[in-house]
Image (cartoon, rainbow, N blue to C red):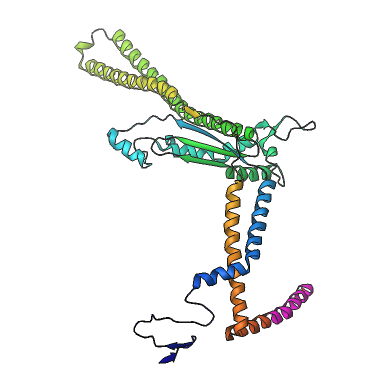
Amino acid sequence: MSTTIPGAGPVRAPTQDEPITLRVAGFNNEAPVLELLNVLLRRWQLVAGVQLVATALVVIVSFIIPATYTATTVFVPEARTQSRLPSNLATLAGQFGLPLGAEPSQSPRFYADVVRSRELLERLLTSEFPDPRTDAGTPASAPLLRILRVRGRDYADSLHRGVKKLNNLIAVSVDNQTSIIRLSVDARSPELAAAAANRLVQYLNEFNAKTRQSQARERRNFVEERVSAAGEELRQGEEAVKTFYERNHFWQQAPELVFEEGRLRRQVTVSQQVYLTLRQEYESARIEEVNDTPVFTIIDPAVPPQERSQPERSLWAVLALALSTMISVSWAFGAGYLERARRDAEPEYREFLGLLGRARRELARAVPRLFRSRRVS
């Protein structure tokens, strides 16, 4: 007994010991792997050729592209914590990147953001570096902006473009557990990459020191002025008490003089307390001005790298081989499907040819119209 399934050939009812099989037109269900291998073997020259040409082109391009070198410096900022939390809680919070007990401006993430600030990048762009393109007709050093070959409408525009380009050449990473900062700089020359990374850390330290010392200096100047004013008020009060005693030798016998003497002595006592408090604050501010000087501990200074970081020719070749393999295999299977469809004269293939021809005709009519409308406009 047999029956017919749409899209498939006649199907005979299997006997009790015969396995059930289904044959679909155009595809061998009993040996699909062999059929796929046959499609690839029929067009092995296409598959191998695409792989070879694509990989060779990518490798050639990797040799044409200028090499990029990456220099990395590792440092840790010295930050004083002013935490009232238990040490174990502060340590646990620091492992999750939460600077509890420390000022936000002393966290490693703060320094990582300052590295990318416009002020530091512009200072680095205007600094002199050994020019790797030095020859008999060029100077030995040049600003980094000129070495990077940044061009603009004017100097301000060139500096703006240079900041964007330099920002893309810099990579900063922060370890929340150890507060270690890794700063990497890419350049065409290994010496230039190392020099730029070390110079940027130097500028970061100078900028940080200038900012913190300015804050501490302002606080110390304010307290110093208050100490001077409080000292003057104390001297005036003491002089008033001295003058009172000189003019009133028998002040104990007059109630008004006793009251006046008590008032003057209270003013002197208050002035003494204010002066002593401000004096202590002044000494503390002087100490803080020295302690607030930030210091970076350089763990690993940047050195000229021995190997390039880009392009990675082996990685490029592997990716090109994998991508070209997928494209060529897909192409081979697509060509095999079209060939089988043409041979079997499937309705979908005839419809495909008709739609393709109509699309060509419509495109041929639309292109001249588009050019004529552009000419008129």
Q: Is residue 331 visible?
A: no
Q: Position of residue 176 (x, y in %)?
A: 40, 39
Of the 4 image quadrants, the one containing the N terminus is bottom left
Give the vertical position of 190 relative to 220 (above or below): below
Q: With respect to residue 305, does 2 lie above or below?
A: below
Please give left or right for residue 230 compared with residue 164 in the image. left
Q: In the image, is residue 63 part of the stretch drawn in magenta?
A: no
Horizontal arrangement in the rendering, residue 82 relative to residue 221 (left or right): left
Query: Looking at the rendering, which quadrant does residue 324 occupy?
Result: bottom right
Task: Report which quarter residue 365 is drawn in.
Answer: bottom right
Q: Residue at x 60, y 55 (%)?
A: 320
Question: Can you say which quadrant of the picture contains the C terminus?
Answer: bottom right
Can residue 297 be seen by looking at this rendering? yes
Residue furthest out toward the front: 17
What segment carries the magenta color?
360-376
Report how many numbered discs are placed on residues in the image.
0
Q: Nearer the viewer, residue 188 or 35?
A: 35
Q: Position of residue 25 (x, y in %)?
A: 52, 83
Residue closest to the eye, 171 or 16:
16
- Quadrant assignment, res 228: top left
> Can you say whether 28 is above or below 117 in the image?
below
Please tell me whether the stretch drawn in magenta is mainly helix, strand or loop: helix
User: Which residue is at a point 44% across and 24% down the rendered structure image?
Assistant: 289
Residue 286: percent from left, percent from top: 42, 21
Instruction: Name the spot of residue 55 as percent of width and height, x first.
Output: 64, 54
Q: Residue at x 29, y 21 (%)?
A: 270
